[in-house]
Image (spheres, coloured by chain):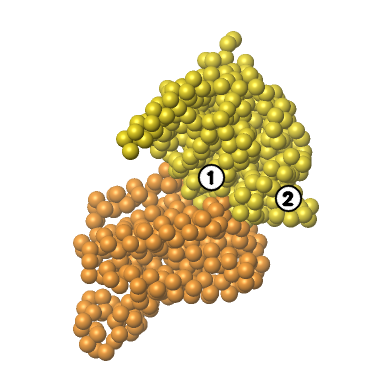
Amino acid sequence: MMTIFGMPTQALFGQLLLGLINGAFYAMLSLGLALIFGLLNIINFSHGALYMMGAFVAWLALNFLGLGYWPALIVAPLVVAALGMLIERTMLCRLYKLDHLYGLLLTFGLALVIEGLFREAYGVSGQPYSVPKELAGGWNLGFMFLPIYRGWVVVASLILCLGTWFAIEKTKLGAYLRAATENPTLVQAFGINVPVMITLTYGFGVALAAIAGVLAAPVYQVSPKMGSDLIIVVFAVVVIGGMGSIMGSIVTGYLLGLVEGLTKVFYPEAASTVIFMVMVIVLLIKPAGLFGKGA
Amino acid sequence: MVMKRLLLGAAALALSAGMAQAQYSDNKVKIGILTDLSGTYSDLAGKGTIVAAQMAIDDFGGKLNGQPIELISADHQNKADIASGIARKWYDTEGVDAIAELVTTAAAIAVREVSKEKGKIDLVSGAASTPLTNDKCSATGFHWTYDTYAMAVGTGDAVVKNGGKTWFFLTADYAFGHNLQAQTERVVKANGGTVKGSVKHPFPNADFSSFLLQAQASGAQIIGLANAGADTINAIKQAKEFGITQGGQQLAGLLVFITDVHSLGLENAQGMMLTTGFYWDMDDQTRAWSKRWSEKMGGGKMPSMVHAGTYSQVLHYLKAAAAAKTDDGVKVADEMRKLPISDFFAKNGKIRADGRMVHDMYLAQVKKPSESKGPWDYYKIVRTIPGDEAYQPLSESTCPLVKK
């Protein structure tokens, strides 16, 4: 059998595929962050908490309303986005003219409050959420057993990420958005309601986090801590990709999933730190990030 | 007015002089619960241990030889430096006489060092590692509820005897995980089994798929989970997702709490063997206590062994402090070793020279969903493991207090 670095190629493919699946979550979350930073100039530290809320809304909908996985994929992002827009309208909108630090502190505080409330209500052990029947089971790919659900996560994340990229970079609406961030006064003069557009953008970024939360619910436990465990890594992804770069955050998300996957095979002890080592190296060589446009 | 103040002052002076003879510092007995109130272990320990300790104080009567008993608590966030900082403050300025619960090995060892130095009592319930009764043992330190040795003896032994001869470990990469793996390896090898390999995963870790595939590739019959809490839960859940268990390999959770089983759901956890120091549904006494605890917690929950153990250790401390007629750490500790322990948690408990409270442990199997009559009806007790068999023999202890 062929081997690479003393590892059978087939097993290596398996691990790469797993890395890609984790990368799908990184990509979805970092995309939302990059979107919000790029268009609102807010470093949204509550992103992880909103991702967690997405998963919890799915769980609550199932247990109290009898709504299954598929409706939850629609309902949870709507509910969380509504809350996000409320936060943006009542709090964040006062900070746009101030230093980044204020937005960061506010959203970090919000994250702690949201997480604390859920912890108080549901404890930390997590709630079980089953894989939907349609996606249960798995395929034997020869080199590994791939649960159908994980395949679905990769596909769903690719569709979402590429769709978002297309909407921002290639459509007229996206062009308005980009123009509004460059020069809001001028765009407003053309008769476009910029504040509403900003609110909707924040809502959309948050909805992406909530969808990721619903997708994650059957894989991990639905737990108040699931967001804070992930958010630091996702921030590293955004920094590596280049703050505010849409494509950068998507590609970096998948790429770092792969890097992490390989580390888990060759030196598992470093799996939780490898992303930060990559971050240090990238910042040293290219301070604006891999896809950033200058400092 | 002046006269009144003088009188009051004189009365206060007289009072404090009188109390000095009773030998309780600050005219009260103060117990501190130092636990994880916000992190990974806050369900299996956390607030529930404060409730359990308060129940012990109430059941004791709220007073000790006429002195009030006070309870305070704090969150050590599973960090050793925070734990030792709080312990030092409690002993030095708050008049705390004993610190109880102490989940997380690193935090427990940090508090052990401070308590030893100050001659105060520490009662460990939640932490698991055996160094607490070996090289880190202390004349005033006690390890109550369970330890990694007992877990390994219970679960490891049962699994090997059921035919699980070859093992692969998924181990949390910190002191506790390493300790649990080493203890279990010892039991596996002693019973004629072999260890095919292990992987040390970061702590905490959410995605186990990569490690599970490595375990699968090893071809071992048993995948031993030398981790705890959310890590164990995620590993078990994902093993099912990746068809590991359907493929013929079995999981052995080496430290599983009832809160973990509740979180996993019986569908995911059924059939698993585990070792525990306590199960709420064993007899009338355990059911009655657990029901009271559950009501105080707001209902809908049942206690873990750490909760029950905290009650037992606090109650025993109070009994000993009453018998010794003092709250002096060394004297109370001597009394604690003399008194037998008999409550709903430990039927025939005794404390050894190394600080280990030896009591019976239970090998349990998680019920099938069809066997369970409702929430928290989760375990079948398969075997009672006598305390002397479950815990490390005193002759093997490296504790300097053990006379050989």
Q: Is residue B362 left or right of residue B212?
A: right
Disc 2 target residue: B377
In the picture, one chain is yellow; tell me its letter. Answer: B
Disc 1 target residue: B46
- Secondary structure, mark 2, is loop
Q: Position of residue B318 (x, y in %)?
A: 58, 29
Q: Verify CB contact (< 8 Å) between mark 2 and mark 1.
A: no
Q: Is residue A283 left or right of residue A54?
A: left
The Cα–Cα distance between marks 2 and 1, rounded to whole angstroms, is: 22 Å
Quadrant location, the C terminus of chain A: bottom left
Q: What is the chain letter for disc 2? A: B
Q: What residue sits 61% from the left and 54% below the top?
A: B298
What's the residue type where badge 2 is placed? Answer: Asp
Q: Position of residue A247 (x, y in %)?
A: 35, 68
Q: Is residue A200 left or right of residue B30?
A: left
- Residue A26 sits above or below residue B135 on the image: below
Q: Quadrant of residue A288?
A: bottom left
**Would residue A210 be visible to someone looking at this image?**
yes
Q: Is residue B148 left or right of residue A293?
A: right
- Secondary structure, mark 1, is loop
- Residue B246 sits above or below residue B12 on the image: below
Q: Quadrant of residue B346?
A: top right
Q: Position of residue B133 (x, y in %)?
A: 55, 24
Residue lying at the far right in this picture: please name it: B371
- Residue B43 sits above or below residue A295 on the image: above
- Residue A198 sits above or below residue B381 on the image: below
In the picture, one chain is orange; tell me its letter. Answer: A
Q: What residue sits 55% from the left and 53% below the top?
A: A123
Give the mark nearer the N terminus: 2 vs 1.
Answer: 1
Label 2 Cα crowd, 10 Å radius (few <14 / some 14-19 / many 20+): some
Q: What residue sits 64% from the left and 46% below the top?
A: B293
